[in-house]
Image: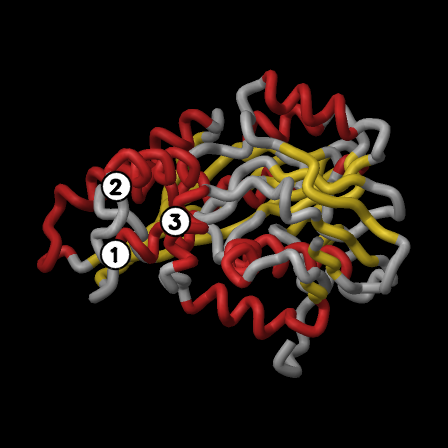
Amino acid sequence: MCGLDFPTDPNVLVGLGTADDAGVYKISDDLALIQTVDFFTPIVDDPFDFGRIAAANALSDVYAMGGMPKTALNLVAYPMEKLGKEILRETLAGGIEKIREAQTVLIGGHSIEDNEFKYGLSVTGFVNPRKILINQGLRPGDCLLLTKPLGTGIINTAAKGKLVKADTIARVTELMAALNKTAAEVLQAFTVSACTDVTGFGLLGHLAEMIIETGIGVTIDSRTVPILPEALEFAAMGLVPAGAHRNRKFRETMVRLGPGVSPVMRDGLFDPETSGGLLFGCRETDAPEIEKRLVDAGVAEATVIGRVSEGEREVIQVI
């Protein structure tokens, strides 16, 4: 990376050498630490909701690695003179709500004065070193499952133009603020070959990371991918975030779109998500039971969206 010589340690189990969601450091044969950090500018108007979403997004990386978060540190950049104390207080309160829901403790943080408001968390979690989930390891014949619908980036773009109904904004806000905790707990009872969470690179961008340099390919059935219908409507109107176009350009050599896949659906599959769901692979024989348990546990839109194929290597076929 940039020609820099990074320090190494044999206890680093997951580090800078991969595109995983977090780093993992081994403490003992039965315990490893997961460490991650994430923050961003407000994507919704309500500061309490912004705090909930930013916290859920940061906590998600620990769940994607197969662990459970334990401690968190606040990260804040804030224009106090411009916005005043109340907005900051509400944002932190929203974050605390999600930290508490995750059964995690807030143990400190750091803040600076900045012209642009930013908020997020640094999170530490625990995992058994033998049960770490990484974003590569998919096996031929595996099914791919997704636990949250796509389209938050498109709808947030439309919301900036005041084009989104209040009930849609409320639903999307709750989706982004929903922890991946329940999904992660369900997965602990099964053998998962690889896992990540779907965020800024979009579904296809994160899927590309799961297969690059692995020699395997995947097939995605766009008809089964959960996507918010309002997102497709806004995408048809051209209200697609710039990030979706960047994601598509970056991974265009790895993606093959079938003749039945519309440009609107394509944009949804590349949509940069905020605090998206878990994307993971499992044995085909386990997929129906995992899907049932996820739905029964309240992860209502979890579904099988594709399979690891025997076709072109390191290619995502979308049908």
Q: Are marks 2 and 3 in contact (CB under 8 Å)?
A: no
- What kind of element bears circle 3? strand
Residue 190 percent location from the top left of the image = 78, 27
Residue 188 percent location from the top left of the image = 71, 27
Neighbor class of circle 2 (other Cα within 10 Å; few <14, some 14-19, many 20+) is: few
Q: Amino acid at mark 1?
A: Lys
| 83 versus 281 height, above or below | below
The residue that disc 3 covers is 120
Q: How is the image coloured?
A: secondary structure
Query: What distance separates the C-alpha of mark 2 from that of mark 3?
Result: 27 Å
Residue in front for this viewpoint, 267 or 4:
267
The residue that disc 1 covers is 160
Residue drawn at 65 percent across, 33 percent down = 303
**Looking at the image, is mark 2 or mark 3 earlier in the sequence?**
3
Q: Are marks 3 and 1 in contact (CB under 8 Å)?
A: no
Neighbor class of circle 3 (other Cα within 10 Å; few <14, some 14-19, many 20+) is: many
For the N terminus, which image quadrant? bottom right
The residue that disc 2 covers is 165
Query: Is 106 placed left or right of 270 in the picture?
Result: left
**Looking at the image, is mark 1 or mark 2 earlier in the sequence?**
1
Residue in front for this viewpoint, 296 or 319:
319
Q: Amino acid at mark 2?
A: Lys
